[in-house]
Amino acid sequence: MKLSPIRAGVVLVKVLVTSSTALAAGDPAAGQTVFAARCAACHSTKPDDNKIGPSLAGIVGSKSGTVPGFNFSTAMKEANLTWDDANLDKYLANPNGFVHGTKMFVNLPNETDRENVVAYLNTLKK
């Protein structure tokens, strides 16, 4: 299949805009600030330090419902998601809408805040 240069450009732009790497373009420092204000009361960034929510150390690339020592909802255990940038963005925008039955009830409605938090989560290692 041969694409015209214009159509190929449109396809490329669409792929770049919808890819998870496009979401990772957020600012990790700004994300850390948002995280501290909106997420840190329930989530730790230290490995094996679960709070009301699970530790988010190394969460990017992991499977949903698998943080050791945290009691996840059945919905989260059965969601079978990989926490990539796109899934994190959707979840943070509307947790219960994305994983119906999750315990998480706080969302991040601002798209820039979500991009920044996802960029920050990408910096966290286990």
Image (cartoon, rainbow, N blue to C red):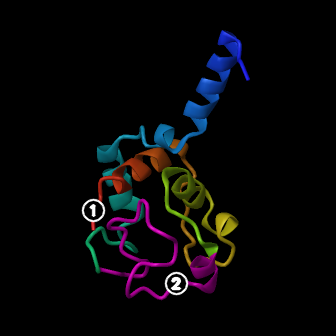
Give the x, y percent position of residue 79. Answer: 62, 73
Mark pair 1, 2: CA separation: 21 Å
Residue at the location (41% across, 77% down)? 54
Apparent side of residue 1 relative to residue 94 in the rendered image (left or right): right
Residue at the location (35% across, 41% down)? 27
Tally of marks: 2
Seen from this angle, which residue lies furthest right? 1
**Residue linked to disc 2:** 72
Residue at the location (58% across, 84% down)? 73
Where, by quadrant of the figure, is residue 5 drawn?
top right
Secondary element at image label 1:
loop
Q: Amino acid at mark 1?
A: Lys
**Residue linked to disc 1:** 125
Give the x, y percent position of residue 85. Answer: 49, 51
Q: Amino acid at mark 2?
A: Phe
Where, by quadrant of the figure, is residue 10 drawn?
top right
Residue at the location (32% across, 46% down)? 28
Indicate yes or no whether the magenta region holds residue 63: yes
Secondary element at image label 2:
loop
Apparent side of residue 112 relative to residue 105 in the rendered image (left or right): left
Indicate yes or no whether the magenta region holds residue 48: no
Magenta part mainly helix, strand or loop?
loop
Q: Which mark is residue 38?
A: none
Q: Nearer the viewer, mark 1 or mark 2?
A: 1
Judging depth in this view, the residue of 18 and 30 nearest the camera is 18
* First reached walking from the N terminus: tag 1 or tag 2: 2
The stretch of residues the image draws in magenta is 49-78
**Relative vertical location of residue 102 with respect to residue 109 in this rendering, above or below:** below
Give the x, y percent position of residue 60. Answer: 41, 60
